[in-house]
Image (cartoon, grey):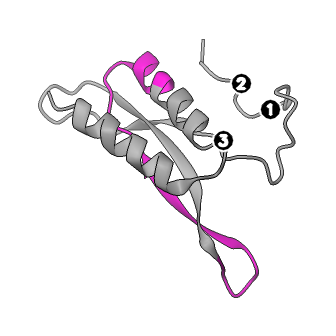
Amino acid sequence: GRGGDGGGGGSSGAPVEGGPPKAEVVESKARQSTGEKTWRAEINMPKNDRFNYDGRARTMCVRGPLRIDRDQAYKDAEDITEAARDCDTAKVKALARKLLSNNVS
């Protein structure tokens, strides 16, 4: 089955609106060399405290490394979500960099 709760129900108890961002696992392009499917964790983090002209906060997408093991991508997503709990974009980007540098194969 699929990992994660799929965003439905909201059983975590935290309010969805205005709560900390959550990382999601997305399927990425297959590796050209082997044709294997790859997955990566992604999270949309608030960017600064500036707002767009329409009043919405700007966000930036922080991505983890490509994984051929979907479970590893979900583990990355958990770690990234944990780092995002206090909405510290710098902390999330630092973790993503660390994951990426540890992923050199």
State how far apart marks 1 and 3 are (Cα).
19 Å
Dot 1 amino acid type: Gly
Tell me if 1 is positioned left or right of 54 in this view. left
CB-based contact (under 8 Å), mark 1 and mark 3: no
Dot 2 amino acid type: Asp
Disc 3 versus disc 2: nearer the observer: 3
Q: Which residue is mark 1?
A: 8
Q: Quadrant of residue 98?
A: top left
Residue lying furthest bottom: 53
Q: Is residue 86 above or below residue 90?
A: above
Q: Which residue is mark 2?
A: 5
Tell me if 48 is positioned left or right of 18 in this view. left
Q: Quadrant of residue 12?
A: top right
Q: Which residue is mark 3?
A: 85
Query: Within 10 angstroms of label 2, few (less than 14), some, or many (20 or more) residues?
Result: few
Tell me which residue sits at (43%, 26%) in the image.
Answer: 73
Screen quadrant of the C terminus: top left
Tell me which residue sits at (84%, 32%) in the image.
Answer: 10
Disc 1 versus disc 3: nearer the observer: 3
CB-based contact (under 8 Å), mark 2 and mark 1: yes
Span colored in magenta: 50-75
State how far apart marks 3 and 2 are (Cα).
18 Å
